[in-house]
Image (tube, rainbow, N blue to C red):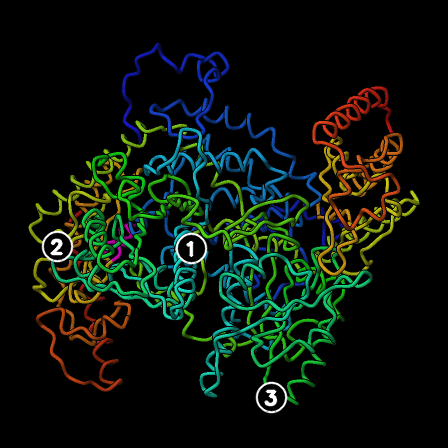
């Protein structure tokens, strides 16, 4: 507790926050200031600045949960000061973690006895989960190659080009080569046939995604499994599979229970899932489950006596909060299988409503499938009038919606999509409202002049794939402009745009 | 939202939680239950089971913050549903992280211009921070060796044997050899002279700790820096230093501002600190700061177009909560220099009170120093009849969690108890703890010595054991132990005095 020192000004407790001098000073941005400020002022000032963040619930870009029940919020707040890693001091919290691991392992049909403990761990998210799984594969493969007396310095991993960035991180940070199966227009996930072709003796595993981030599609893990079994018979390499079920892991078991993608397939050795996506918990929790003890090399597990008791740990993070783990247990127990099923069915229904609404405008192609993660990915039918998905995305922000637009991965990067993720709290009302607002946006865009050229595309984030792009809109022409010319083009475009906007506004005001 | 379906029982909402059938069924442990249960029941049952966890405030084993002001709790709760990584959607939250990075960089005297943005990032804790820093060193060293045409497959890192486990994790997971400088019985931190001797051409960096976990001592980073500069002149290897200031980073600038340990020393290239230790934030936030852009290889930074905008990222974790970042900013501006200084001075004062109380019992050696992280590490002067582990166990009955552990090699004959003084450990609690420790010593004195066969297993302590070493069967040992404890419990019931 801070010792109270007499302030040099008049009694601070009397002055209202808005009347105090604290709201007149600019908050420090580079250096800590010398003096303390009252806690009420600190709270108010930070709270007010944070109002300028967008609303989490309208963030349709993210899969991550943004709403939980108040009872769960209470549990979260009560455990916010428990450091999860103190297993000896918080044995119940550790027990709840283990129960979650067991439940999720059973959900994935891990081959376990009735009271047998599953092998798995809670992580901060699927990134950490994937790194742990990848590490386990890498170490296993290295041990095998050492035993065979073969070189073990060039491990690689086979995935689709549609993988989430954490696989690329894993590859780069842990020095594993990433062999990507390119996607093509009309087929935006990893092709199992091509994947198995790319497997060689240095492949530590093949990673399949259950719920591609781009369009929510489930990859065909069963086909991959069967093809890989064949190849392994011929080569004797025993290449295993990892399933990145970050989104799909809490969807497939409830609405597609007959779909074989998990430990029912013998080559699948580990699975990760994000508790904070369709596990319905706030950001900060993921899970990785291994098939059995043999799939997790013992030399990666640490047994430590850090705080006075023996604890075994295989995570990248050490100290972290306990709240999300308790929240995950709450959800599993509170909802049960029927609760999760209801929620996933609702999400699916609302996705269909949104999709139907968008199709009815007649202006969009739907790139997501009906089955898979409840996501609607859509692109403009033809860019007549020279507008693209990025502009639609920008304009939707004015209504408060955050709908991202991005190009597909290579070799389909000429296709741009808008993507709406249907989370548990996205009701039908909101779906219908979104369709309505999209219609308005299309209407307004039609009135605007087309974008100038391929280079004049303001607001489009520059990525390597994007720059290789040819013209997206038919109206563009390829011409090398100097920087100054490009600047002028962009300025002129925006001037026209703003003028057009003002005209629309005036018309609106006059019309109402 | 879950569609309401008609339940087959009578209306569940009428029953009070403890009258309902939900408290009669055991909560599932292995498989998800088929049915849902009402949220009130779920809350109550989980809450009740969690009552059996230890009390975080009495956990004297941990450095991690266990109390924050209610205003901050409010900010935390209102941002619990913001996924930090959505930088485009939550620009203010991202801005607050950047401000924290700047402030902490300045605290560490990073060589920055007035409005220059520091190079650093918020992490989930010092473990992630250390892995990122280590990765940067490893990649820098590899690039340099490749440019020189020399082998780059055997990187190593030099640290003391007193390092926290995350360095060993880094070494094992990222395939770097860990070269540990062994401790001695009277010197529990890394000896800079020995460390510099161990540096070779494959060393990616030397890691010094500001605030050893074992006894809170600050390592002499300045001496290490000076010795390493000398060696680098001779060898031309340019070996850098990383300072693991997980605990000390928020103490030294306030209590010992003249101590040179940070970027004022030219060889220090990166520093990590735990926001959730003396940064005074709940568990889940750490910081790593690099001296300059050159010390963070660009190829490790990802620029991605994941959710529709360009986001540079160099962290191991991706999605995570925003609450702790906002809480860290709250603390930095709410407290300012004077606030942190007051708190650290209080911690130090209370540490001295506890230390003196323990010294007055005449039964303990104090192993920690006065300067450093405010903790008291102490061992029994005579641990032949009862050792520190028993003291630790018995303190639990009073509610205190005080860990006991042996020092790492080559000082493993020394066992210590360690009490960490956190912000919320007041003088009253310090005095109460001394009182309870005296009670424990009194209790232990009335008990017979530990069973000798147990000690015979532990080779190091066998020679300290005065009692006869007899090999007993497991059953006999069990019986002896049960008898001792039965006697003990009976005696305890007689002694419930107030101190």
At which x and y percent is residue B499? 87, 30
Residue A224: image tag: none
* Residue in front for this viewpoint, B316 or A10: B316
Q: Are marks 1 and 3 in contact (CB under 8 Å)?
A: no
* Nearer to the camera, A497 or A377: A377
Residue B265: x %, y % from top left? 67, 77
Marks 1 and 3 belong to one chain? no
Q: Which residue is mark 1?
A: A136
Q: Image point 59% across, 85% down: which residue?
A: B237
Q: Nearer the viewer, mark 1 or mark 2?
A: 1
Under circle 2, the secondary element is: helix
CB atoms of marks 3 and 2 within 8 Å: no
Please provide the residue range marked out in magenta: A394-404
Q: Is residue A276 left or right of residue A381?
A: right
Residue B422 in picture, x, y percent from top left:
71, 48
In the picture, measured across the screen, residue B386 lies left or right of residue A397, that is right
Instruction: Count the marks.
Output: 3
Tell me: residue A256, above or below residue A220. above
Residue at the disc numbered 3: B236
Whole-Å distance between the Cαs marked 1 and 3? 37 Å
């Amino acid at each position: 507790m801070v010792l109270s020192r007499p302030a040099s000004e008049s009694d601070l407790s009397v002055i209202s926050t808005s009347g105090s001098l604290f709201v007149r000073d600019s908050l420090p941005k580079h250096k800590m200031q010398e003096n303390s400020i009252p806690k009420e002022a600190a709270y108010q000032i930070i709270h007010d600045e944070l109002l300028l963040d967008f609303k989490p619930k309208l963030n349709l870009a993210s899969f991550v949960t943004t709403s939980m029940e108040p009872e769960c919020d209470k549990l979260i707040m009560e455990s916010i000061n428990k450091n999860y890693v103190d297993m000896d001091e918080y044995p119940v919290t550790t027990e709840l973690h283990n129960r979650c691991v067991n439940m999720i392992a059973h959900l994935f049909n891990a081959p376990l006895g009735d009271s047998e403990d599953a092998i798995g761990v809670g992580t901060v998210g699927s990134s950490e989960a994937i790194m742990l799984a990848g590490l386990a594969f890498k170490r296993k493969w290295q041990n095998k190659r050492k035993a065979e007396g073969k070189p073990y310095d060039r491990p690689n991993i086979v995935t689709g080009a549609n993988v989430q960035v954490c696989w690329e991180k894993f590859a780069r940070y842990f020095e594993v080569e990433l062999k990507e199966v390119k996607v093509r227009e009309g087929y935006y996930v990893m092709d199992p046939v091509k994947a198995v072709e790319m497997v060689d003796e240095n492949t530590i595993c093949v990673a399949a995604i259950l719920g591609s981030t781009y369009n929510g599609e489930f990859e065909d893990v069963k086909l991959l499994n069967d093809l890989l079994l064949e190849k392994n018979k011929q080569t004797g390499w025993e290449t295993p599979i990892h399933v990145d079920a970050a989104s799909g892991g809490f969807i497939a078991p409830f609405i597609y229970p007959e779909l074989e993608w998990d430990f029912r397939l013998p080559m699948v050795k580990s699975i990760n899932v994000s508790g904070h996506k369709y596990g319905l918990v706030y950001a900060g929790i993921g899970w990785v489950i291994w098939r059995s003890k043999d799939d997790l090399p013992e030399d990666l597990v640490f047994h430590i006596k850090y705080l006075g008791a023996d604890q075994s740990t295989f995570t990248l993070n050490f100290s972290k909060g306990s709240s999300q783990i308790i929240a995950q247990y709450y959800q599993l127990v509170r909802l049960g299988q029927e609760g999760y099923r209801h929620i996933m069915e609702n999400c699916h229904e609302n996705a269909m409503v949104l999709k139907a609404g968008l199709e009815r405008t007649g202006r969009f192609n739907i790139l997501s499938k009906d089955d898979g993660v409840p996501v609607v990915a859509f692109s403009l039918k033809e860019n007549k009038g020279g507008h693209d998905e990025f502009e639609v995305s920008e304009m939707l922000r004015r209504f408060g919606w955050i709908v991202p637009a991005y190009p597909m991965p290579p070799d389909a990067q000429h296709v741009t999509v808008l993507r709406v993720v249907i989370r548990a709290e996205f009701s039908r009302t909101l779906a219908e409202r979104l369709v309505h607002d999209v219609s308005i946006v299309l209407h307004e865009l039609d009135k605007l002049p087309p974008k100038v050229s391929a280079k004049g595309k303001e607001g489009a984030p520059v990525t390597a794939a994007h720059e290789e792009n040819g013209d997206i809109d038919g109206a563009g022409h390829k011409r090398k402009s100097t920087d100054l010319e490009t600047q002028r083009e962009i300025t002129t475009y925006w001037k026209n745009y703003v003028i057009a906007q003002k005209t629309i506004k005036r018309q609106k005001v006059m019309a109402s | 939202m879950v569609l309401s379906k008609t339940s087959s029982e009578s209306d569940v909402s009428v029953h009070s939680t403890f009258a309902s059938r939900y408290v009669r069924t055991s909560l599932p442990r292995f498989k998800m239950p088929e049915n849902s249960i009402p949220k009130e029941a779920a809350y109550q049952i989980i809450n009740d089971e969690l009552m059996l966890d230890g009390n975080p405030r009495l956990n004297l084993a941990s450095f991690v913050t266990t109390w924050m002001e209610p205003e901050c709790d409010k900010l935390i709760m209102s941002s619990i549903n913001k996924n930090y990584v959505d930088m485009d959607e939550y620009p203010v939250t991202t801005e607050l992280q950047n401000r924290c990075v700047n402030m902490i960089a300045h605290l560490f005297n990073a060589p920055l211009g007035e409005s220059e943005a520091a190079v650093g990032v918020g992490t989930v804790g010092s473990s992630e921070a250390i892995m990122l820093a280590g990765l940067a060193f490893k990649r820098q060293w590899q690039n340099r060796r490749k440019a020189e045409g020399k082998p780059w497959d055997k990187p190593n890192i030099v640290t003391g044997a007193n390092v926290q486990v995350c360095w060993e994790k880094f070494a094992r997971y990222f395939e770097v050899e860990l070269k540990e400088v062994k401790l001695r019985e009277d010197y529990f931190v890394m000896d800079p002279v020995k460390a510099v001797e161990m540096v070779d051409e494959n060393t990616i960096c030397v890691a010094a700790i500001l605030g050893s976990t074992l006894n809170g001592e600050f390592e002499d980073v300045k001496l290490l820096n000076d010795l390493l500069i000398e060696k680098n002149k001779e060898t031309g290897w340019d070996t850098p230093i990383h300072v693991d200031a997980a605990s000390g980073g928020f103490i030294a600038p306030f209590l010992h501002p003249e101590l040179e340990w940070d970027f004022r020393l030219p060889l220090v290239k990166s520093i990590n600190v735990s926001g959730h230790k003396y940064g005074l934030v709940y568990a889940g936030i750490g910081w790593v700061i690099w001296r300059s852009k050159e010390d963070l290889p660009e190829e490790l930074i990802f620029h991605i177009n994941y959710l529709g905008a360009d986001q540079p990222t160099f962290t191991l974790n991706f999605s995570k909560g925003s609450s702790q970042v906002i809480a860290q900013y709250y603390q930095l501006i709410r407290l300012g220099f004077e606030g942190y200084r007051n708190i650290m001075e209080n911690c130090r004062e209370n540490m001295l009170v506890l230390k003196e109380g323990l010294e007055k019992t005449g039964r303990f050696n104090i192993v920690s120093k006065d300067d450093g992280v405010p903790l008291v590490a102490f061992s029994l002067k005579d641990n032949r009849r009862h050792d520190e582990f028993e003291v630790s166990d018995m303190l639990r009955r009073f509610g205190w969690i005080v860990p006991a552990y042996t020092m790492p090699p080559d000082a493993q004959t020394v066992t210590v108890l360690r009490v960490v003084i956190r912000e919320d450990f007041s003088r009253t609690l310090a005095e109460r703890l001394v009182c309870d420790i005296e009670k424990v010593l009194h209790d232990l004195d009335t008990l017979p010595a530990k069973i000798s066969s147990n000690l015979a297993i532990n080779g190091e302590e066998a020679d300290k054991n005065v009692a006869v070493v007899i090999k007993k069967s497991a059953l006999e040992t069990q019986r002896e132990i049960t008898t001792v404890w039965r006697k003990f419990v009976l005696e305890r019931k007689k002694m419930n005095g107030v101190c």
